[in-house]
Image (spheres, rainbow, N blue to C red):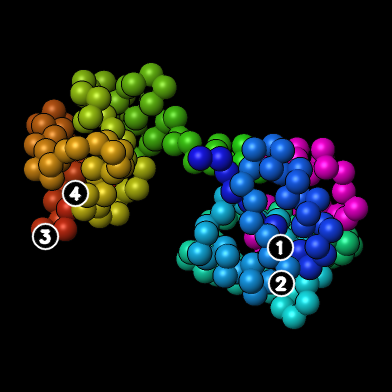
Amino acid sequence: MGRRILAIDDEKDILELLKYNLEREGYGVLTAQTGERGFELAKAKKPDLILLDLMLPGVDGFEICKLLKNSPDTRAIPILMLTAKNSETDQVLGIELGAADYLAKPFGVKVLLARIKNIFRNKENDQEPPKVIRAGDFVIDRARRRFTIKDRPYELTKLEFNILGFLMENPDRVFSRDELLSGAWGTEAFVVDRTVDAHIRSIRKKLGSCRGAIETVRGTGYRFNREP
């Protein structure tokens, strides 16, 4: 399924222009002519990007941006502001409110498409897990598939490596078995809960005197302790 973009602008001609050019690029397009309607659509449809005009009737674009960034349903959606309000003050305010980018009207379609692609590229890069994870004396190097404690290498299976890496990325946070399944195996894997317990036992055995780094939180799950 292609990415979906929500365009919020009170000018019908602008919306038609955006819809035509974005659909030519393979994007799905949703449109709204008021901020209130745009906010409703964003919560209901959860698009991959929002193009937001600032000079909207009723609730203006700045307020809609605040609403979007304060809502748990929409705060992660990047916002590209498209507006005739192109003063430096307006641009700074837009960025401070959480907009990913700011493009002044009138704009060229090619420039707009390039900005959109850049936002998606940055979002993908942000979602990539770090290649090297450090937590106390523990170091996981994903690129080299290597795990060390105080520079001493330890042999782990692929799943053990994934579990430990997931825990180390979020030290001191407690994860349920379901969360570990999703983080280490992926949401589509078919693995029973107790398989997690078996792999945790195996990791602890290999860690030897450092086994206390993986704590069992009774009735909840597991967490990585940087200072066992």
> Could you tell me how far apart the alpha carbons at marks 1 and 3 are, in whole angstroms?
46 Å
Residue carrying label 1 = 8
Q: Which mark is residue 219?
A: 3
Between disc 2 and disc 3, the foreground one is 2
Kind of residue sitting beneath label 2:
Thr
CB within 8 Å, label 2 to label 4: no
Residue 179 location (% of width, % of height): 26, 49
Kind of residue sitting beneath label 3:
Gly
Residue positioned most to the bottom: 58
First of labels 2, 4 by sequence position: 2
Residue carrying label 2 = 34
Residue closest to the eye, 36 or 187: 36
- Label 1: which secondary element: strand
Residue closest to the eye, 83 or 227: 83
Residue carrying label 4 = 177
Measured along the vertical axis of the image, is residue 203 above or below residue 144?
below
| Picture residue at 81% right of the left edge, 70% below the top | 55
CB within 8 Å, label 1 to label 2: yes
Residue closest to the eye, 80 or 151: 80
Measured along the vertical axis of the image, is residue 46 above or below residue 180?
below
Residue 77 location (% of width, % of height): 57, 55
Q: Which residues are magenta?
A: 96-117
Task: Please indicate, yes or no, whether residue 211 appears anywhere in the rendered image.
Answer: no
First of labels 1, 3 by sequence position: 1
| Picture residue at 25% right of the left edge, 25% below the top | 158
Which image quarter: residue 68?
bottom right
Between disc 3 and disc 4, the foreground one is 4
Between disc 1 and disc 3, the foreground one is 1
- Label 4: which secondary element: helix
First of labels 4, 1 by sequence position: 1
Kind of residue sitting beneath label 1:
Ile
| Picture residue at 36% right of the left edge, 42% below the top | 169
